[in-house]
Protein backbone atom coordinates (compact mmCIF):
# COMPACT_ATOMS: atom_id res chain seq x y z
CA UNK A 1 0.00 0.00 0.00
CA UNK A 2 2.66 2.54 1.01
CA UNK A 3 4.94 2.08 -2.00
CA UNK A 4 2.07 2.68 -4.41
CA UNK A 5 0.87 5.69 -2.41
CA UNK A 6 4.36 7.20 -2.43
CA UNK A 7 4.26 7.33 -6.23
CA UNK A 8 0.66 8.59 -6.36
CA UNK A 9 0.95 11.39 -3.78
CA UNK A 10 3.35 13.88 -5.28
CA UNK A 11 4.78 16.35 -2.82
CA UNK A 12 3.62 14.52 0.30
CA UNK A 13 6.25 13.56 2.88
CA UNK A 14 5.94 10.14 4.44
CA UNK A 15 7.19 10.72 7.98
CA UNK A 16 8.55 7.42 9.32
CA UNK A 17 5.66 5.73 7.46
CA UNK A 18 3.42 6.97 10.29
CA UNK A 19 2.29 10.36 9.02
CA UNK A 20 1.68 12.22 5.76
CA UNK A 21 2.66 15.88 5.56
CA UNK A 22 2.37 18.51 2.87
CA UNK A 23 2.70 22.29 2.85
CA UNK A 24 0.35 24.25 0.60
CA UNK A 25 1.27 27.87 -0.30
CA UNK A 26 -1.22 30.57 -1.29
CA UNK A 27 -1.21 34.21 -2.40
CA UNK A 28 -3.02 35.52 0.65
CA UNK A 29 -5.10 34.91 3.74
CA UNK A 30 -8.50 34.49 2.07
CA UNK A 31 -7.18 31.90 -0.39
CA UNK A 32 -5.56 30.04 2.51
CA UNK A 33 -8.78 30.07 4.54
CA UNK A 34 -10.84 28.96 1.54
CA UNK A 35 -8.53 25.97 1.18
CA UNK A 36 -8.72 25.19 4.91
CA UNK A 37 -12.52 25.27 4.77
CA UNK A 38 -12.55 23.00 1.72
CA UNK A 39 -10.23 20.53 3.50
CA UNK A 40 -12.49 20.63 6.55
CA UNK A 41 -15.52 19.82 4.40
CA UNK A 42 -13.79 16.89 2.66
CA UNK A 43 -12.34 15.58 5.93
CA UNK A 44 -15.69 15.72 7.68
CA UNK A 45 -17.35 13.93 4.79
CA UNK A 46 -14.77 11.12 5.14
CA UNK A 47 -14.94 11.26 8.96
CA UNK A 48 -11.15 11.49 9.04
CA UNK A 49 -9.72 14.76 10.30
CA UNK A 50 -6.16 16.00 9.68
CA UNK A 51 -4.08 18.27 11.87
CA UNK A 52 -3.63 21.62 10.14
CA UNK A 53 -1.19 24.44 10.87
CA UNK A 54 -2.57 27.60 9.31
CA UNK A 55 -0.82 30.92 8.78
CA UNK A 56 -1.32 33.92 6.51
CA UNK A 57 -0.34 32.28 3.23
CA UNK A 58 0.23 28.59 3.94
CA UNK A 59 -1.34 25.52 5.43
CA UNK A 60 0.65 22.51 6.62
CA UNK A 61 -1.45 19.34 6.69
CA UNK A 62 -0.50 16.33 8.79
CA UNK A 63 -2.51 13.14 8.37
CA UNK A 64 -2.31 10.01 10.52
CA UNK A 65 -4.88 7.59 11.90
CA UNK A 66 -5.00 8.45 15.58
CA UNK A 67 -7.39 5.66 16.55
CA UNK A 68 -5.07 3.07 14.98
CA UNK A 69 -2.12 4.17 17.11
CA UNK A 70 -0.88 7.05 14.93
CA UNK A 71 0.06 4.95 11.92
CA UNK A 72 -0.68 5.32 8.23
CA UNK A 73 -3.78 3.56 6.98
CA UNK A 74 -5.83 3.53 3.81
CA UNK A 75 -7.95 6.31 5.36
CA UNK A 76 -4.92 8.60 5.31
CA UNK A 77 -4.10 7.84 1.71
CA UNK A 78 -7.71 8.43 0.65
CA UNK A 79 -7.89 11.76 2.47
CA UNK A 80 -4.62 12.94 0.91
CA UNK A 81 -5.92 12.01 -2.54
CA UNK A 82 -9.15 13.92 -1.89
CA UNK A 83 -7.20 16.99 -0.73
CA UNK A 84 -5.16 16.84 -3.94
CA UNK A 85 -8.40 17.15 -5.92
CA UNK A 86 -9.24 20.53 -4.32
Image (cartoon, rainbow, N blue to C red):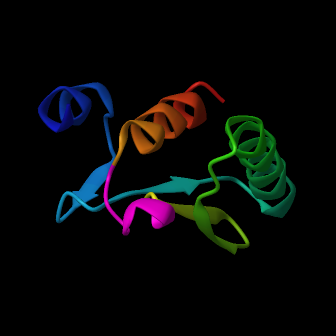
* Image x and y of residue 67, in percent: 49, 63
Quadrant location of the C terminus in the rendered image? top right
30 on left or right of 24: right
Is residue 21 depicted above or below 44 in this figure? below
Front one among 46 and 3? 46
Residue at 73%, 37% (x, y): give it: 42
Q: Residue at x 32, y 52 (%)?
A: 72
Residue 67, compared with residue 82, is above or below; it is below
Image: 42 above or below 36? above
Q: Which residues are magenta?
A: 66-72
Specify the quadrant of the image occupied by residue 29.
bottom right
**Quarter holding the N terminus?**
top left
Residue 68 is inside the magenta segment: yes
**Foreground residue among 25 and 7:** 7
Relative to 44, 67 lies left or right: left
Q: In the displayed structure, would residue 62 be above or below residue 5?
A: below
Please give the name of the residue rendered at 62% of the width and 67% of the height, measured from the top-left corner: 52
> How many circles with numbers are drawn on the protein?
0
Q: Position of residue 24 (x, y in %)?
A: 54, 53
Q: Is residue 2 left or right of residue 11?
A: left
Image quadrant in which you'd find residue 17: bottom left
Q: Nearer the viewer, residue 7 or 78?
A: 78
- Taking the view exactly as shown, the residue that stands out farthest to the left is 3
Magenta region includes residue 70: yes
| Snapshot quadrant of residue 10 | top left
Instruction: List x then y, in percent, for residue 80.
Output: 48, 39
In this rendered view, identify the residue nearer to me: 16 or 25: 16
Which residue occupies 45% across, 58% down?
A: 65
Amino acid sequence: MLEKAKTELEGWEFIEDKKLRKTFQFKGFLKTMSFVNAVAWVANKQMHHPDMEVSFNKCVINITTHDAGNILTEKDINLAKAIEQL
